Amino acid sequence: MKRPEIHLYDLGNKVTAFSTTRKGGYSEGPYGQFNINCYCGDEPTAIQKNRAALCELLGIDDSRLLMPHQVHQTKVAVIDEAYLKRPHTDCLQLLEGVDALMTDVRGVCIGVSTADCIPVLLYDEEHHAVCAVHAGWRGTVKRIVQQAVLRMADTYGTRPASLVAQIGPGISLDSFEVGDEVYETFQHEGFQMSTISRKDEKWHIDLPACNRLQLLDVGVESASIHHADICTYKHCEDYFSARRLGIQSGRIFTGILCSK
C-alpha cells in the first residue's frame, strides 16, 4: 500500500495534526496523487484506497476518519459518542452542509477539505477537544473561526486563551486577487482593510491574516497561533490549488485527532 506524504504540525504530545500533500496516493490526473474528497469528481476506487492508506498511517478505522460536505457557510457539527453509534447513512447526512467539525472523542480524526481556502485547526489540551475549520473567503467574512471557538467554549468549557491554533496551507495575499465586490463585502463587515488587503491592478486579500486576527479578537494568545505559511497557488505541485488546477481537481485534507 502506498504511504501518503503528510505535513505534520506540532500542537502537543497528545494530538496528531497534519495536512495531506498531493503525493503518495492512487488518484490520477488533476486529482493525483492523494485525494480523499468524494465531492470533486475523483474516482471512488482511488478515493477509497487513499482513505485506507491514510487510516493505516493514523492507526484508525475508516469509520473514524470524518470530513464534512462543506458549503462555505458557518455550520459547526459536534462529533460525540452518540454520533459514532448512528447508522452510516445517518452519519453522512449529519455532515451535509457543515464547514467545521469538533470532537472530544479520542481516536477520531476530524478534518476539512481545501484547495486554496484556509484550514484552521484548534486544540484544547485541557478538555482533550479538537476542531477543524474550513474558512474560504465566504466563511472568513462570516467569521466562522470565531464561531467555532465560541462553540467549543459552550460545548466543552474551552478557554480561548488555552487554545493552540494552526493555520494550514492556503492561498496567500500575493495570490488571492479579488474583485471589488469581495473587497466591499469584507469592508462592509467591519474588517480593517488597511491590515488585510493590498491594491495592485486589483485588490488582494490576506485570508490567513484575517483568520489570525479573528482568533486574537476572540481571546486566543498570539504565541499560540501558528501558520504553515504555505501558499497553495504558488506550490500547486505539492498542494492542490483550485485556481491553478481548476475546480475538477483534488483537495488537501487537514485533520486532527487526540490519541487514546
Image: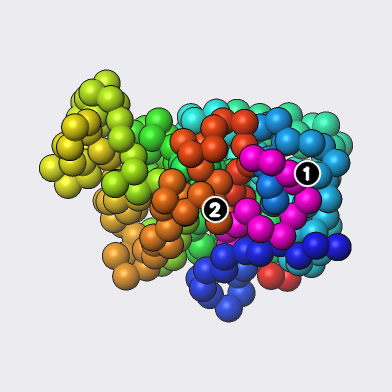
Residue found at the far top of this picture? 181
Q: Earlier in the sequence, mark 2 or mark 1?
A: 1
Determine if the magenta segment contains residue 20.
Answer: yes
**The disc label shown at residue 237, or none:** 2
Quarter of the image where the C terminus is located: bottom right
Residue sitting at x 62%, y 64%: 6
As helix, strand or loop, the secondary structure at mark 1 comes to helix
Residue sitting at x 48%, y 29%: 73
Residue found at the far bottom of this picture? 13
Q: x%, y% of residue 84? A: 78, 47
In-image side of 34 versus 251 (left or right): right
Q: x%, y% of residue 10? A: 51, 73
Quarter of the image where the N terminus is located: bottom right
Q: Which residue is mark 1?
A: 47
Going by the numbered disc 2, the residue's amino acid type is: Glu
Residue 122 visible in the shown view: yes
Q: Write down the region rendered in magenta.
A: 18-30
Name the quadrant containing residue 82.
top right
Residue found at the far left of this picture? 194
Going by the numbered disc 1, the residue's amino acid type is: Ile
In-image side of 138 versus 253 (left or right): left
The colour scheme applied to this rendered structure is rainbow
In-image side of 213 versus 94 (left or right): left
